[in-house]
Amino acid sequence: MTAPTALIADDEPLLRESLQRALAAAWPELRVLAQARNGREAVELFEQHEPDIVFLDVHMPGMNGVEAARQIARRAQIVFVTAYEQYAVQAFEQGALDYLVKPVDELRLADTVQRLQERLRARAAGTPQPQLDLQAAIETLARKLMQPDAAGSNATASAAGHLQWIRASVGSTLKLIPVDQIVFMRSDEKYTLVVWQEGEALIRTPIRELVEQLDPQRFVQVHRSVVVNLHAVSHVTRGPNETADLHLRDRPEILPVSRSYLHLFRQM
Amino acid sequence: MSNPSPIAVPGQANTPSPWQGFVAYLTPLRLALALGLASLAAVMLGPIFIIPFPWALLAFAAAGQWPRRLPRWWARWLFQVLVVALAVPVATLLVYLVAVGGDFASLIRSEGRVMGFLWIAGSGLLVGPLLAMGALYRQRDAEARNQALSFELERSELERRALDARLRLLQAQVEPHFLFNTLANVRALVEAGSPQAAPVLRSLIAYLRAAMPRLQDETACLADELGLVKAYLELMHLRMPDRLVYEIAVPAELLRLRFPPMALLTLVENAVRHGIDPSEEGGRIELGGRLDQGQVRLWVSDTGVGLVQQMGSGTGLRNLRERLQVVYGESAALDLQENQPHGLRAEIRFTP
């Protein structure tokens, strides 16, 4: 039997070295073929070296450890390494995946090494291995990891899907305005005027599109061209012909409320 | 007071429409009082004395609402008193005219009626303004009470916000992920016998001490905060030496400034967590400061991934903004900008 081989992937160089040293002590025959700095490199180096075992840090920039494991799948024994991921550890325990917790404990590592050695021996001998549903376990892990920030890739939306930031050019700089600071927005022909506590800016997104992305509990349309943050309203005064004027806390502007939106401000 | 409270102050722009104000002023109690006084006067002096009081009330209420704006030199209270004083004789005259069928000449001819009119007008001129002044006094009293209440409300709101900010600071915790990863690094250094181990442990201790829950430290200054930020950045640089470069350049004149603990650290942690860490190439963090016409500007700028990554709901930044406003007042500001070609810049501004 040829010497078993391994790949280590971690974005922190000291931890790669540390794991390699610990493995050298616990399993002298194991040859570490390469070290990867992120998930993408791990997959590339795996394809290149085809090691028996891959140690994957869960948290890595770009592609994380779980995504890398998906791509490597059954072609190697995968051991996840993590500093502290409450959810991840639960998933490991349910899914019978191998994992190590940083800083790596020697006894724990010895256990893992023993298990890996048994599996490699069984595979070499051609005995049928207990079928672990590796793929399902990885999917569970991926789900658990994604839970804290479920919204995924949409940069400016919260978990509930509402817009949290508005990007607006002020002079030559691109500002990020937290939506809860916005007082009101008014459509201004081609543009939308965004007014917040400390300033105002024009953006190109039409007010109709913005309204759909904002939290309806907080932002309401009070006029064909005006959307207001309810938290910024001071009071409303009735005008003639079923209209009203809306006064703001921190801004001098007085906004029109048209008849079809007046029901929002009826007395309780 | 920056935000006008919705109290009905006659003559100010934020009152409801004049008609509503007028009708609202005529409460059943006030009507009953006017009619009661009128009846009393009628019983004691003569039936004709029933006239002035209801008219005085109507005139007083109306003058409180119309016209909506008075010239600056024309005080509303004086206007109301004058209108009441005029209303009594005019109203009496009108009632007399109606009584005699509009014949002014016959009114003049009857000496008894002229004497009656003079009596009523005279007593109206005397009593009307007195009643009006009394009413005004009561009204001002009520307004003062309303104002006091709304001030009280505002103050308790501010106190609540300060308390909230303090409580959130108490809850500030060291993230276990950060702690265990850093400890793993420290262990790696110790095992390798690296001379770096001792300074890194020193940074970790400084960071942990600062991050422990505590009450507001009144004596904390910017130099303390920069020490904490430096400890944190040193630790992160140790962990990702190939991905994180940083520079701290704050002029010495700012170092003794009073500064709330963890405020800059929040921004630097954000820059690492959301800017540098998600990027394969990493980036650079610059912390700078400047005194600009009495206003202090402190910024944290990174060349990380910018806003393409999930940034959460911005709760951390909102808390920070609130804390700054509690410490430095409403003028304190925090804003974010995007850097070119990528990255974020967060800037704090306040007047010390």
Image: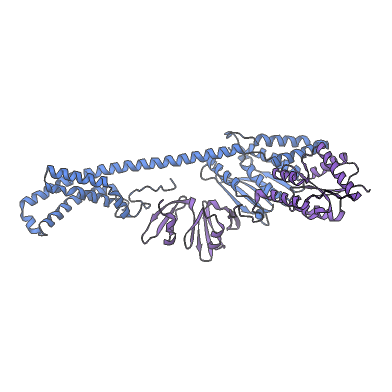
Quarter location, residue B166 = top right
| Front-lying residue, B233 or A1 | A1
Instruction: Point out the image quarter for the N terminus of chain B.
Output: top left
Q: Nearer the viewer, residue B67 or A207?
A: A207
Quadrant of residue B130 within the rendered picture: top left
From what the image shows, is residue A64 above or below residue B201?
A: below
Residue A11 spot, x, y in % from top left: 77, 47
**Residue A202 visible within the image:** no
Q: Nearer the viewer, residue B244 or A144?
A: A144
Q: Is residue A266 above or below residue B129?
A: below
Colour representing chain A: purple
What is the total number of numbered labels drawn onto the structure image? 0
State the hue of chain B: blue
* Image coordinates for residue A60, horizontal then vertical, percent: 75, 49
Residue B19, percent across and down?
Answer: 31, 55
Residue B52 x/y as whole percent: 18, 48
Quadrant (top left, top right, bottom left, bottom right) of the C terminus of chain B: top right
Residue at 16% x, 51% y is B89
Left or right placement of residue A155 versus residue A187 in this view = right
From where the camera sits, is residue B20 visible? yes
Q: Nearer the viewer, residue A186 or B44?
A: B44
